[in-house]
Amino acid sequence: MALVIPDVLEESCATRQALERLAAKWRVLLIYALLAGPQRHAELRRRLPGITQKVLTENLRSMESDGLVERRVLKDTAPQHVEYALTALGRTLREPLSAICAWALEQSDG
């Protein structure tokens, strides 16, 4: 299979658009956290020290609109309980993230 080298410098490049979406500060960490399974907002905040409630909510909403995360209502009445989970599309990022982690570990051995 031939190596495809996209023109990521072009704004219309699908690869560039994907990289820009994933490059947001907390996105990859949120995906990594959600690979462990569905979690509620408070659990995600505990797992990601330093993220504010506002930033977490903004990222989750944005990731939901991108089709990476789904929001499930567990309890409709106040106080409402919701959890977040990766969609099938979000779960496809497991292998690329594992490859990046493996690469980082190889580079740190020196």
Image (cartoon, grey):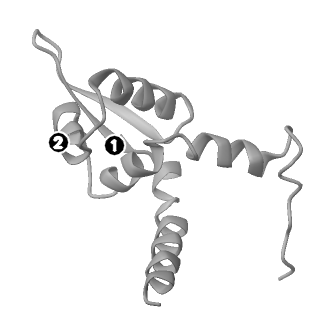
Direction from residue 40 to residue 85 in the image, left or right = right
Q: Residue farthest to the front? A: 110
Label 1 SS:
strand
Direction from residue 72 to residue 86 in the image, left or right = right
Say which residue appears at 52% left-offset and 70% top-offset. 100
Q: Earlier in the sequence, mark 2 or mark 1?
A: 2
Q: Look at label 2 and name its amino acid.
A: Arg
Q: Quarter of the image holding residue 96?
A: bottom right
Tell me how far mark 2 sits from mark 1, CA to CA: 16 Å
* Relative image position of residue 73 (x, y in whole percent): 24, 25
Say which residue appears at 39% left-offset and 50% top-offset. 29
Direction from residue 110 to residue 19 in the image, left or right = right
Q: Quarter of the image holding residue 80?
A: top left
Closer to us: 90 or 57: 57
Say which residue appears at 52% left-offset and 59% top-offset. 92
Q: Look at label 1 and name its amino acid.
A: Ala
The tag on residue 85 is 1
Closer to us: 55 or 72: 55
* Relative image position of residue 18 (x, y in whole percent): 67, 46
Indicate the quadrant containing the N terminus: top left, top right, bottom left or bottom right.
bottom right
How would you rate the neighbour count of disc 2 (Cα within 10 Å): few for under 14, some for 14-19, many for 20 or more? few
Q: Please give the residue where the numbered disc 2 appears in the rendered image.
A: 46
